[in-house]
C-alpha cells in the first residue's frame, strides 16, 4: 500500500470516504482483516487495526507527496527547515532543538515510517496478549 500511494498520489484522494470499493481494495482489506484471525481480536478490532495501519501509511505518503512526490525526501526537507529554526531560535525550543540534534547525529533521518509501523504492531501485540490473558465472554 505504501508503494502504491507513493507511486500514484491520486489514489490517496480516491480511497477515502464512503464509496463503492473495487476488488483490489476489497482484497487488500480482506487480507488485512483476516491476518490477525485467531488472535482474540474481534472482527471490529481487526477492522480497527486495519484502519490504524492505513492511517499511518496515508500520513507518511501525504508527507512524501507534499515534499515533491515519491522521489522527494520530506525528512531531509523538514530537517533543513528545523535546523535553521533550531539554530536561530533554539533557546525558545530546547526540546525540539535537542531532538533535531539527535536526529542529525543518527544520519539525519528519524525513520518515521518504520518507527510508526513498529509501534503500531507493538501496540497490537500488547492488546492481543492482554486479550489472551483474560478472554472476553
Image: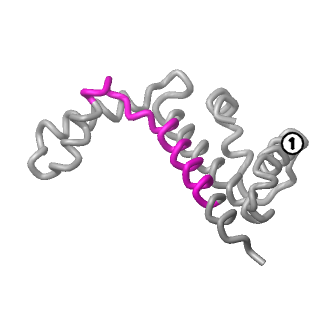
Split into 4 quadrants, where in the image is the C terminus?
bottom right
Q: Nearer the viewer, residue 86 or 120?
A: 120
Say whether residue 9 is left or right of residue 77.
right
Q: Position of residue 32 (x, y in %)?
A: 77, 46
Position of 128 relative to 137 (above/below): above
Q: Circle 1 — which element?
A: helix
**In magenta stretch: residue 126:** yes
**Magenta part mainly helix, strand or loop?**
helix
Q: Residue drawn 51% across and 33% down?
A: 64
- Residue 80 is a magenta residue: no
**How many marks do you count on the picture?**
1
Choose between 19 and 87: the one closer to the eye. Answer: 87
Q: Nearer the viewer, residue 44 or 122?
A: 122
The residue tagged 1 is: 27
Q: Residue at x 83, y 49 (%)?
A: 34
**Considering depth in this image, is 92 or 136 the residue closer to the camera?**
136
Farthest bottom residue in view: 137
Residue 25 vs residue 123: left or right? Answer: right
Q: Quadrant of residue 70?
A: top right
- Which residues lie in the magenta part? 104-127
Amino acid at each position: 500500500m505504501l508503494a502504491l500511494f507513493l507511486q500514484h498520489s491520486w489514489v490517496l484522494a480516491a480511497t477515502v470516504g464512503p464509496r463503492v470499493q473495487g476488488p483490489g481494495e476489497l482484497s487488500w482489506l480482506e487480507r488485512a482483516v483476516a491476518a490477525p484471525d485467531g488472535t482474540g481480536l474481534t472482527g471490529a478490532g481487526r477492522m480497527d487495526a486495519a484502519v490504524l495501519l492505513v492511517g499511518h501509511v496515508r500520513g507518511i505518503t501525504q508527507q512524501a507527496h507534499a515534499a515533491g512526490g515519491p522521489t522527494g525526501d520530506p525528512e531531509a526537507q523538514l530537517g533543513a527547515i528545523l535546523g535553521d529554526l533550531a539554530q536561530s531560535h533554539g533557546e525558545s525550543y530546547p526540546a525540539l532543538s535537542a531532538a533535531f540534534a539527535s536526529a542529525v547525529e543518527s544520519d539525519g533521518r528519524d525513520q518515521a515510517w518504520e518507527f510508526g509501523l513498529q509501534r503500531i504492531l507493538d501496540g497490537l501485540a500488547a492488546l492481543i496478549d492482554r486479550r489472551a490473558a483474560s478472554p472476553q465472554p
